[in-house]
Image (cartoon, coloured by chain):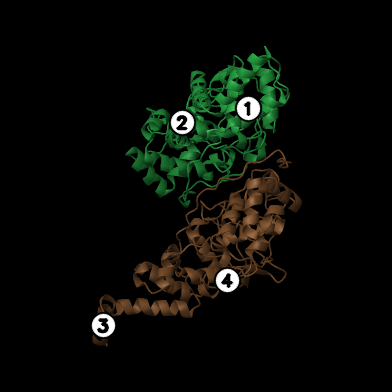
Chain colours: A green, B brown
Amino acid sequence: MKKRVTIALAIAAATSLFADAPAAGDTLIKKAKAAGLAPIPSDKAALMKLIDNPKNPVTDAKVALGKKLYFDPRLSKSGIISCNTCHNLATGGVDGIPAAIGHKWTANPHHLNSPTVYNAVFMSRQFWDGRSPDLEDQAQGPMQAAPEMAITKEMAVERISSMPAYVKAFKEVYGDDKITFKRIADTIGAFERTLVTPSPFDKFLQGDENALNDAQKEGLKVFIDKGCVSCHTGVGLGGSMQPFPVAKPYKYANIGDFKGDKNGMVKVPTLRNITETAPYFHNGAVWSLSEAIKIMGETQLGVTLDDKEVNAIKTFLTSLTGEKPKIEYPQLPAVTEKTPRPDAN
Amino acid sequence: MKKRVTIALAIAAATSLFADAPAAGDTLIKKAKAAGLAPIPSDKAALMKLIDNPKNPVTDAKVALGKKLYFDPRLSKSGIISCNTCHNLATGGVDGIPAAIGHKWTANPHHLNSPTVYNAVFMSRQFWDGRSPDLEDQAQGPMQAAPEMAITKEMAVERISSMPAYVKAFKEVYGDDKITFKRIADTIGAFERTLVTPSPFDKFLQGDENALNDAQKEGLKVFIDKGCVSCHTGVGLGGSMQPFPVAKPYKYANIGDFKGDKNGMVKVPTLRNITETAPYFHNGAVWSLSEAIKIMGETQLGVTLDDKEVNAIKTFLTSLTGEKPKIEYPQLPAVTEKTPRPDAN
């Protein structure tokens, strides 16, 4: 018996060191794909098809205008809060605080954490309770929400319409100079659709077995085998609506009053760039990624992950930190004497 | 008599239409220079010499680091306010509101308006009361001010030091990894020194007589002849400390309690990009540039400018709207588990 084991180990060692190493990578790619994981397409046409919205086609001119509006604080009642304030493209597409703070320093009333705008296009629904079907629809919410940007539709339209350079830009995009709140949100949505961040993991799924190091590959295996992939799947590694909590109560459920949608379903956040988007969970209660992984195991999968497993998964997650699109900070049109004044109250 | 006048007019007309037009431009350039107006150098070496600080040399690495810190909201206690919040590079280097709003939505206690960071390097002093000698010193103020970013020196250093990419960047800039509050402010100051905006008026002063149209040239003459240039002079078209008010009380002196420095002296704001930096004056009381010009005539020069003169000056001022440096929106280092948490209170 001892001899047979020794031979088996020798074969395993040889396999691992030589012939089987690439094959193992290849096998892992197949396993990951079979588990539903998918890459951000490297082919531009395929990517455009994936991120496009037939009801709001992504065009260069629309994206350029949407970028300006995304960064424009005049879209808030106070004049000092933009989309980028809470979904900051410099810091993983988030604000890095537990619960969003907006107009008049008001915290989100449900203590909800700002989700990242990067790769949000891959989410099947928007907002933690999934109440919005797409980015264009989502963008209308925070602009109007009293504790966020607190502007009325009419005021937003009046502000933007008062600046000739914006009127010209809308005409270029839409063929007429009709500026509506929906169009404002649509152009912002179009810009947000372009905010995707290809990562080493995408290269790996596309066949580059060396894009992940051994520790990351090992972590990917644990990630799949433990069942994390059952929710964190697809191109977005998240984005569907799922029950929460499943196996055990969520440890920090007492922070805020969020209970999901009417069926208790919660949108699964993307794991892309997760190393950059602390604090974690819908109520931003957890700063440590290791703790977040451990909690997910218990709460959702009913498993206790040991430190080695937690570390392995965490190491895999580092491969999801992607390259951000280069964004030239915009020059925004100047206000005119017709522009409705900012109001901090 | 009539004949002589007719001849004189005919000569004047001929002069204006033909021979004298370029000469007039040339004369106006000389007149402007004689009045103390000076261009932003187009020669890079000359510009670098002008904007540099021997005590804090402007280097590419320092500017790159300073840019990151300028945009980094983790330099505020709350984690959501950066230098760029009040000195927004997308909107003329200002926040576009009468008085700055900062930590906990606190308005500036003296109702002071955020001055533009563009071309601030050309100001001889910083802050409205000139209490700071340079940008490096200035940058230390708002970070610590309770109604602005509200961070302590220690917390700023601890936050930045907790992010390895920042530690590496400081090492690259300074040769050692010592991160101090002074160094944080110094790198921000170095970045701010590069924020200069060459305009058509600079081309004009450099000899391109066609850089200004006739109406702008006419406005420049009025600007000089009425005496605006006595304070709004030099490369910055402002930046010295001057008495305020001089001839008549300032119409909106009741807003806020600012009275200048201990001698009643106030820093003259730059007129560069003035079309983009409403509202105007130290207390941001005036939204109309025309009204601002009229008030300055009365308050400082003791003259009543008629509408034609006001318009002429306003038209000249449009030639001061300059080209902004292209700035790639930075990707900031991610927080670590060691990073002191944001505190919104």
> Which chain is indicated by disc 3?
B
Q: Which residue is mark 3?
A: B11
The residues bearing labels 2 and 3 have C-alpha atoms spaced at a distance of 74 Å
Label 1 is placed on what type of residue? Ile
Label 3 is placed on what type of residue? Ile
Q: Which residue is mark 2?
A: A40
Q: Report crowding for label 4: few under 14, some 14 to 19, many 20 or more residues within 10 A (C-alpha).
A: many
At 53% across and 68% down in the image, what residue appears? B48
The residues bearing labels 1 and 4 have C-alpha atoms spaced at a distance of 68 Å
Camera-nearest label, 1 or 4: 1
- Mark 2 and mark 4 in contact? Answer it, CB < 8 Å: no
Give the secondary structure at mark 3. helix
Q: Report crowding for label 1: few under 14, some 14 to 19, many 20 or more residues within 10 A (C-alpha).
A: many
At 38% across and 27% down in the image, what residue appears? A55
**Residue B60 visible, this angle:** yes
- Name the residue nearer the viewer: A326 or B236: A326
Give the secondary structure at mark 1. helix
Q: Report crowding for label 2: few under 14, some 14 to 19, many 20 or more residues within 10 A (C-alpha).
A: many
Give the secondary structure at mark 2. loop
* Residue A274 at x, y percent in the picture: 60, 33
Q: Which residue is mark 4?
A: B300
Quadrant placement of the N terminus of chain A? top right
Camera-nearest label, 2 or 3: 2
Q: Are marks 2 and 4 on the same chain?
A: no
Label 2 is placed on what type of residue? Ile
Pick whichever of labels 4 and 3 is earlier in the sequence.
3
> Which chain is indicated by disc 2?
A
Q: Are marks 1 and 4 on the same chain?
A: no
